[in-house]
Image (tube, rainbow, N blue to C red):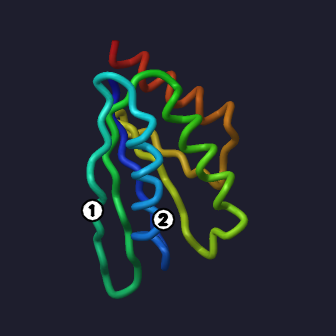
Amino acid sequence: MSTATVAVSGAQAAKWAAELRGVLAASVGAGERVSRVEVEKSATVVVAVIGLVFSGVGTAKTLWDWWQGRRKDEGGVTVTIQFGDGTSIALANTNLEQLQIVFQQADSQQR
């Protein structure tokens, strides 16, 4: 099992993170976990954070599918995944293959 944090930032961060959390929670496998959404607000930005414990690349596909349905309406919202090893990847700057590779590498390092 590996860990990651998904950070959603922007004007719609809390709404999008709650929606994403629901999608992720509905797709978790045995031993995987999705934390509740933690919202952090400052004077200039809202960031909603979701913690993940995952195995394999299934979570990557779930995130990608969700993002593909939202990216046309992104409106300044960014989604960044920070892995336990320090690797960070923004969904807007990647493709499914690259995302799956990063998830697989993170999972392989934990075994």
In the figure, 29 relative to 66: above or below?
A: above
Q: Residue at x 33, y 18 (%)?
A: 110
Instruction: In the displayed orientation, state which residue is furthest to the top.
Output: 111
**Could you say which is closer to the camera, residue 108 or residue 28?**
28
Confirm or deny contact between disc 2 and disc 1 (CB under 8 A): no
Above or below residue 20? Residue 29 is above
Q: Position of residue 32 (x, y in %)?
A: 32, 29
Amino acid type at image mark 2: Trp
**Badge 1: residue crowd in 10 Å (few <14, some 14–19, many ≥20):** some
- Report how many numbered discs are placed on residues in the image: 2
What residue is at 61 percent from the left and 53 percent from the top?
A: 67
**Rendered location of residue 22, percent (x, y):** 41, 51
Farthest residue to the bottom: give it: 43
Q: Position of residue 35 (x, y in %)?
A: 27, 47
* 12 vs 101: above or below: below
Q: Is residue 96 above or below residue 82?
A: above
Q: Which quadrant of the figure has residue 101? A: top right
Residue under the image location 46 percent in, 54 percent down: 20
Q: SS of the residue at dot 1?
A: strand
Q: Quadrant of residue 44 in the image?
A: bottom left
Q: Position of residue 111 (x, y in %)?
A: 34, 12
Provide the residue designation for mark 1.
38
Label for residue 16?
Answer: 2
**Left or right side of 78 for 44:** left
Q: Residue at image x 51%, y 22%?
A: 104
